[in-house]
Image: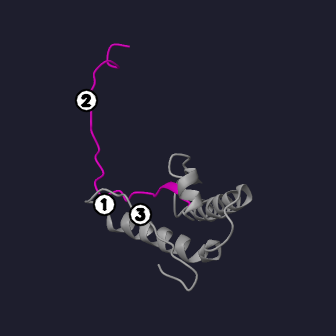
Amino acid sequence: MATDYGEIEHVQTMKDGLFLSVRRTADLINDSLLRAHLWAVDRNITKTYIDDVIEGVNSYLANLKAQGAIISGKCYATPELNTPANIASGKVSFDFEFTPPYPAEQIIFRSHLVNNSVIS
């Protein structure tokens, strides 16, 4: 997403064949985080900046968890991506993961006929 100040983007890694509700949850989270963190574009990259972004994402994910929209979620800054060279060129990366609730598409009941109670 381009802004007047810079760029903000997300890279989504998901497997094909996901339930529509799971894909929509992922789309909603990705879009919401991009829009909510436009304030972070063109700010100085400091430890406090990184902590503030992580705290903002984790707060949003915790809110979704409290609403039952996701089961869990967390954000972190991956050191391998935030090298001094990347920071010097104005690039900072944050990873976040979440687990959405999956719909019960197929409910299976298995019955077992046992006779071990007959002799007791």
Give the total number of marks visible in the rendering: 3
Image check: 87 left or right of 111? Answer: right
- For marks 1 and 2 on the same chain, the one whose residue lies earlier in the sequence: 1
Q: Nearer the viewer, mark 3 or mark 1?
A: 3
- Labels 2, 3: front one: 3
Name the amino acid type tagged 3. Val
Above or below, comparing residue 23 to residue 39 in the picture: above
**In the rendered structure, which segment of residues is drawn in magenta?**
92-120
Q: Position of residue 115 (x, y in %)?
A: 28, 21
- Residue 94, by quadrant, is bottom right
Label 1 element class = loop
Residue 110 is a magenta residue: yes
Q: Residue under circle 2? A: 113
Residue 77 visible within the image:
no
Residue 11, which numbered label? 3
Measuring from the top left, give residue 117's x and y in whole percent.
35, 20
Q: Between disc 3 and disc 1, whose residue precedes?
A: 3
Residue 6 visible somewhere in the drawing: yes
Residues under numbered marks 1 and 2 in contact, where contact means CB atoms less than 8 Å apart: no
* Residue assigned mark 1: 18
Q: Which mark is residue 116?
A: none
Q: Which amino acid, by three-letter code, is at mark 2?
A: Leu
Quadrant of the rendering where the C terminus is positioned: top left
Residue at x 27% of width, y 37% of height: 111
- Is residue 119 shown left or right of residue 39? left
